[in-house]
């Protein structure tokens, strides 16, 4: 049997010689042989799988003591032990996340009285110049902003409306800030189930959904599809969502540039949507709201035809949400309005 030097074994496994010495010292991965004069370590080729498993478990954050237990189990039992460990870690992380969220809220409230702030909002939903029906839904209230874009078809408008309606109970629910994301995730599951309930043999409805739910200092964001959310803060416009489209996947993989993506014939092909695929996969995030923030939620009927610079100018120059929405819809029509237009603008104001 031809042994590998510690350097060759390190290169073969993607580990460092230092890591191998640590794993040897703690009994996780002793070398196959040690030179009695130089103390140099040698490893057998068949030790590579164990080394890679140890490295993978370390990258996942598993403590060395638990790695020793997992490595001593048969593959199926090891997989079960790893899954059980990850469920414990996830539960602990969620508990710590709630504790951190509460602390963030308390610290933020020392600088501003968020209970005395509110959303000032405006919403519009237009058919556009080419479509003969409107599958978009736009909704705004003091605690919920939402836009949904139903896939064109017999139940497209129903799908978008039901997706937004599934979030409406969160407007009045007394959900603690720390539990807001979990409540939002449950609402998305209900929305997905409602959309799938309208499926027939001839039609599978689907819809995007982008929404913000407000509780005190916190905004919970949910996003599926290619509708978008933007934030204007301190004069700077930032995008809060990433499109779930086939073309965006190509951009992420480096196979297309953003400029090429904008002109791609399949730029509207969704990779994720409510009602589509095996199960819903939504992006969820918590953000801290600040007085003076201006938020824009819109369907691709606006974002696909109005460039970011014009969006920025319209949001920055408008005196209030109503004026901003009016200007944004004007820009969409000036660009031809080939699709339905859903648009919500809200200011967080004292």
Image: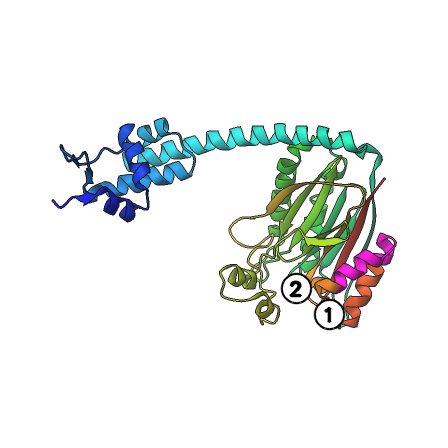
Distance between the alpha carbons at the discs numbered 1 and 2: 10 Å
Q: In which quarter of the image is the N terminus?
A: top left
- Residue 57's x, y, as percent? 37, 37
Magenta segment: 310-324
First in sequence: mark 1 or mark 2?
Answer: 1
* Circle 2 residue: 152
Q: Residue at x 69, y 30 (%)?
A: 176
Q: In which quarter of the image is the C terminus?
A: top right
Q: Residue furthest left?
A: 1
Q: Nearer the viewer, residue 309 or 53?
A: 309
Q: In which quarter of the image is residue 201?
A: bottom right
- Labelled pair 1, 2 in contact (Cβ < 8 Å): yes
From what the image shows, is residue 228 above or below residue 19?
Answer: below
Q: Quadrant of residue 127?
A: bottom right
What secondary structure is the stretch in magenta mostly built from?
A: helix
Residue 25's tag is none
* Circle 1 residue: 131
Q: Which residue is drawn at 15% across and 35% down?
A: 35
- Residue 56's x, y, as percent? 37, 40
Q: What secondary structure is marked by label 2?
A: loop
Describe the colour scheme in one phrase: rainbow
Classed neighbour count for the residue bearing mark 2: other residues with Cα under 10 Å, few (<14), some (14–19), many (≥20): some
Task: Determine if residue 175 is in view.
Answer: no
Q: Residue at x 30, y 33 (%)?
A: 23
- Residue 273's x, y, as percent? 59, 54
Classed neighbour count for the residue bearing mark 1: other residues with Cα under 10 Å, few (<14), some (14–19), many (≥20): some
Q: Is residue 128 rendered to the left or right of residue 285?
A: right
Q: What secondary structure is marked by label 1?
A: loop
Q: Does the magenta stretch include residue 256?
A: no
From what the image shows, is residue 249 above or below residue 146?
Answer: below
Q: Which of 163 and 331 is in front in this view?
A: 331
Task: Determine if residue 146 is in view.
Answer: yes
């Amino acid at each position: 049997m031809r042994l590998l030097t510690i350097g060759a074994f390190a290169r073969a496994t993607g580990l460092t010689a230092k890591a191998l010495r640590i794993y040897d010292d703690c009994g996780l991965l002793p070398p196959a042989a040690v030179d009695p004069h130089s103390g140099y370590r040698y490893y057998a080729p068949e030790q590579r799988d164990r080394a890679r498993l140890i490295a993978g478990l370390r990258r996942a954050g598993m403590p060395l003591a638990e790695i020793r237990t997992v490595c001593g189990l048969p593959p199926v039992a090891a997989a079960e032990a790893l899954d059980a460990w990850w469920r414990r870690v996830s539960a602990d992380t969620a508990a710590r996340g709630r504790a951190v969220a509460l602390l963030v809220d308390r610290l933020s409230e020392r600088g501003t009285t968020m209970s005395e702030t509110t959303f000032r909002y405006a919403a519009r939903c237009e058919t556009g110049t080419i479509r003969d029906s409107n599958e978009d839904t736009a909704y705004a209230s003091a605690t919920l902003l939402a836009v949904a874009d139903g896939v064109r078809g017999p139940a497209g408008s129903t799908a978008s409306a039901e997706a937004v309606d599934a979030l409406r109970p969160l407007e009045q629910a007394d959900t603690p800030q720390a539990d807001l994301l979990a409540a939002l995730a449950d609402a998305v599951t209900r929305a997905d189930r409602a959309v799938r309930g309208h499926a027939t043999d001839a039609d599978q409805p689907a819809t995007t959904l982008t929404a913000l739910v407000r509780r005190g200092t916190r905004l919970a964001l949910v996003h599926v599809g290619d509708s978008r959310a933007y934030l204007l803060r301190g004069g700077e416009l930032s995008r809060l969502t990433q499109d779930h489209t086939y073309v965006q996947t190509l951009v992420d993989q480096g196979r297309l540039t953003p400029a090429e993506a904008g002109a791609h014939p399949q730029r509207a092909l969704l990779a994720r949507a409510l009602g589509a695929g095996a199960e819903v996969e939504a992006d969820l995030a918590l953000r801290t709201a600040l007085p003076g923030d201006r938020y824009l939620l819109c369907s691709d009927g606006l974002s696909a035809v109005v460039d970011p610079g014009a969006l920025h100018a319209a949001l920055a120059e408008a005196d209030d949400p109503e004026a901003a929405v009016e200007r944004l819809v004007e820009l969409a029509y000036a660009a031809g309005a080939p699709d339905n237009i859903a648009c919500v603008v809200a200011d967080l104001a004292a």
